[in-house]
Amino acid sequence: MRILVPALLAVLATSCGAANTPAAPTPATTQTTAPALDTQSPSVTMVVFPKTLRAQGTVNFQLGTRDNTAVDRVVLTIDGKTFVDDPTAYNSYAQYFDAAANGEHTVTVRVYDRAQNVTEQTQTFTVQIGP
């Protein structure tokens, strides 16, 4: 019985977390990286034709847009008033003018990408309809 008690105590001590208890497994670590932020603005070129409108009709605005991700929106204003706000980022627009619009006008294009980086370009054109 004297031999049995120490052996029994040794078994109990081992099963209760004393000596020779295996360490808990270390959880696997995964390294995640955040997606890169888009800080690059889109580029835009604009051709306005005709530069001088001499008969009632349309002035055309042809755009070339480019971005490292995607162009998300195009906004055109004439003399500060929006006439295009296009979420499809199409590249060709036109505006009708008659003699009531005679004079010099300013067209501004703003091109946005999905991260809302923006590029702006401004040009002028003239409406000169009349005798």
Image (cartoon, rainbow, N blue to C red):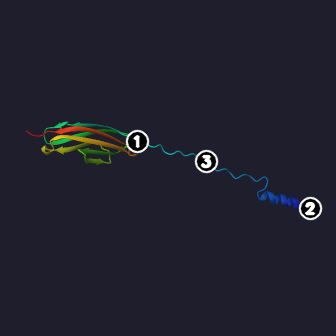
| Position of residue 26 measured from the top left corner of the image (x, y, whole percent) | 66, 50
Which mark is drawn over residue 29?
Answer: 3
Kindly indicate whether the residue at mark 3 contacts the one at mark 2 (C-beta within 8 angstroms).
Answer: no
Q: Quickly name the residue at label 1.
A: 69
- Looking at the image, is mark 3 or mark 1 earlier in the sequence? 3
Q: Quickly name the residue at label 2.
A: 2
- Looking at the image, is mark 2 or mark 3 earlier in the sequence? 2
- Looking at the image, is mark 2 or mark 1 earlier in the sequence? 2
Kindly indicate whether the residue at mark 1 contacts the one at mark 3 (C-beta within 8 angstroms).
Answer: no
Badge 3 density bin: few <14, some 14–19, many ≥20, Cα 10 Å:
few
The answer for how far apart the CA atoms under marks 2 and 1 are is 80 Å
**Amino acid on which disc 1 is placed:** Thr
In which quadrant of the rendered image does the N terminus lie?
bottom right
State which quadrant residue 79 falls in: top left
Return the residue found at the far left.
131
Kindly indicate whether the residue at mark 1 contacts the one at mark 2 (C-beta within 8 angstroms).
Answer: no
Foreground: 125 or 87?
125
Foreground: 113 or 82?
82
Which mark is drawn over residue 44?
Answer: none
SS label for mark 2: loop
Residue 27 vs 69, above or below: the answer is: below
| Position of residue 112 measured from the top left corner of the image (x, y, whole percent) | 35, 44
Residue 104 appears left or right of 39: left
Residue at 13% x, 45% y: name it.
100
Residue at 9% x, 40% y: name it.
130
**Amino acid on which disc 3 is placed:** Thr
SS label for mark 3: loop
**Amino acid on which disc 2 is placed:** Arg
Badge 2 density bin: few <14, some 14–19, many ≥20, Cα 10 Å:
few
| Position of residue 45 measured from the top left corner of the image (x, y, whole percent) | 30, 36
